[in-house]
Image (cartoon, grey):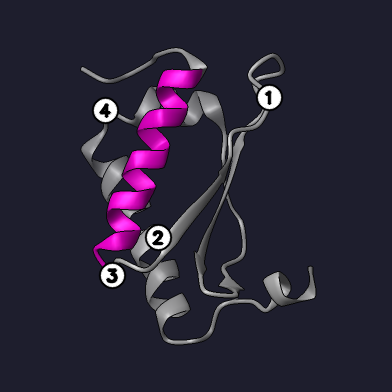
Amino acid sequence: MFAGGSHPEVTRWLRNFLTAHAKRVSPRVEVLLDPGDERTGAGYRARLRLGERTTDALELEYPDVARNRASLAWCTALAERVAGLARTLVAGRGSADARAR
């Protein structure tokens, strides 16, 4: 069972999960993951990137990810959110904030 785990272990699992579901939409989509601060239990901020376009941030809390990564329903809902963001990005409707940097 995958529930729980250290911050680095959960971060690695989340990066792999997000990448797998984003790349099912397009292999060119990349995941940008800010793992937060494990000392404060801060959450994750994830964006998808395709070329110069990025999506808005997807924010997840470390305790929620650690607790729910063994839940099929939670993982299915997260996979659908990631795929939806990736489809929006591939369709050319991602935010332009990457160009402004």
Residue type at numbered disc 2: Arg
Camera-nearest residue between 34 and 62: 34
Q: Earlier in the sequence, mark 3 or mark 2?
A: 3
- Magenta span: 8-26
Q: Gap between marks 2 and 4, in whole Å?
A: 17 Å
Residue at 42% across, 86% down: 91
Q: Gap between marks 1 and 3, in whole Å?
A: 30 Å
Q: Gap between marks 2 and 1, in whole Å?
A: 24 Å
x and y, in percent, of residue 93 in the image: 53, 84
| Image quarter of residue 82 | bottom left
Q: Earlier in the sequence, mark 4 or mark 1?
A: 1
Horizontal side, residue 98 vs residue 85: left or right? right
Q: Which residue is mark 3?
A: 25
Q: Secondary structure at mark 1?
A: loop
Prevailing secondary structure of the magenta residues: helix
Numbered tag placed on residue 75 in the rendering = none
| Image quarter of residue 67 | top left
Residue at 34% across, 40% down: 16
Residue type at numbered disc 3: Val
Q: Which residue is mark 4?
A: 70
x and y, in percent, of residue 65 in the image: 44, 31
Numbered tag placed on residue 37 in the rendering = 1
Q: Earlier in the sequence, mark 2 or mark 1?
A: 1
| Mark closer to the observer (2, 1) | 1
Q: Gap between marks 4 and 1, in whole Å?
A: 23 Å
Vertical arrangement, residue 59 with respect to residue 24, above or below: above
